[in-house]
Image: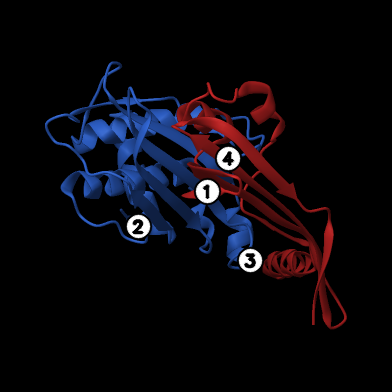
Chain colours: A red, B blue
Amino acid sequence: MRGGIVGLALLFAMTAACASGTASTGAFTQTARIEAELKRGTSTKMDVQRVRGTPKGTGGAILPLDPRPREVWYYSDISATNMRREGQELRGDIRVQFVLVFFRDGLFDGFMWSASTTIPLEEK
Amino acid sequence: MKRTLTAMLVSLGPFASGCATEQASRVEAPYVPDRDQTVRVVRCEDRTGTQTGRDLAREATQHLVEKLQDAKLFQVADDASLVLTCDIERFEEGSALKRWLMPGWGATQADIAVMAWRQPGDQILATFRSHAHVDAGGLYTIGADRYILSVALDDIVGQLRQWRAGTPPQGGAQK
């Protein structure tokens, strides 16, 4: 009986070691809601928080051709999936999404979104 | 009696389970004692995308309100100009069996962010974050998923207490 339990534990441990790894900073937030629910010049910071959540960072920017300062909220989502060792290489798929939300005079003034496609990660 | 027992278990759980938290806060404006005695708590948003069969937003909101009241930091009122918004950014149930077999595997985790606002005017006063996790431990860590939100919110309330006291934030920034 004791041998069976130990065997089961070892099996679980070996399965765990072989399982493909996943790591992320949390769920990927859909940016479509920004366009659907926020209005430029009208929506407030609290509206943006309600749609997009708490920003990971905040700051300011002056954009080219428009010297008026803007406040910027920064969001990012990162995930690594299907992490696996192949010989001497560690391989996996990385997905990254960045969103910058701009405010002028405290109101939503647009956003910039950038996302990666699935990029294979190689680490020797 | 049942509530007292549950509260004791929740309080003791983190100590018995190797639960850890990391915090980060950013203070934009100091606490104003004369003005900010009451607070309005907006229902937490569950942004985890996980299907647990639980209403994490309701649980977290309830924990936050109870902890604020227990800590006697603020009175909770619907018409307060100091407003707290709350996001559950990550929740992973994890598994005590997996942790028992291999530390780090099957970690239970929760990330919560709380923003303090002054309304009207949409002024952000401070942002508080906590990452609570149980990475290792034996089968005695069963149930970590039940108290991990509470642990993260304990940490947040601790940060709110520091902000209220004017203490510089740990692991964060102050303007």
Which residue shows up at 70% across the image and 55% down it?
A79
Residue B94: x %, y % from top left: 60, 51
For label 1, the SS is strand
Q: Number of callouts in the render?
A: 4
Please, what is the three-letter code of the amino acid marked with disc 1? Ile
Question: Mark 3 Cα within 10 Å, few/some/many (few <14, many 20+)?
Answer: many
Q: Secondary structure at mark 2?
A: strand
Residue with the most extreme left position: B34
Residue at left offset 30%, top offset 49%: B159
Find the distance from the CA under tag 3 to the CA under tag 2.
39 Å
**Mark 3: amino acid:** Leu
In the rendered image, the quadrant that contains the N terminus of chain A is bottom right
Query: Do callouts 4 and 3 point to residues on the same chain?
Result: no
Looking at the rendered structure, whether the residues under marks 3 and 2 are on a common chain is answered as yes
3 and 1 marks in contact (CB < 8 Å): no
Q: Indicate which disc residue A101 carries.
A: 4
Q: Nearer the viewer, residue A83 or A41?
A: A41
Mark 4 falls on what kind of element?
strand
Determine which of the numbered discs, if any, sits on residue B173 in the image.
2
Name the residue beneath numbered marker 3: B101
Q: Nearer the viewer, mark 4 or mark 1?
A: 1
The answer to whether residue A69 is left or right of residue B38 is right
Label placed on residue B53: none
Q: CA distance from mark 3 to mark 1?
A: 53 Å
Which residue bears the numbered disc 1? A62
- Mark nearest the camera among 3 and 2 is 2
Q: CA distance from mark 1 to mark 2?
A: 23 Å
Where residue B70 sits in the image (x, y, percent)? 23, 34
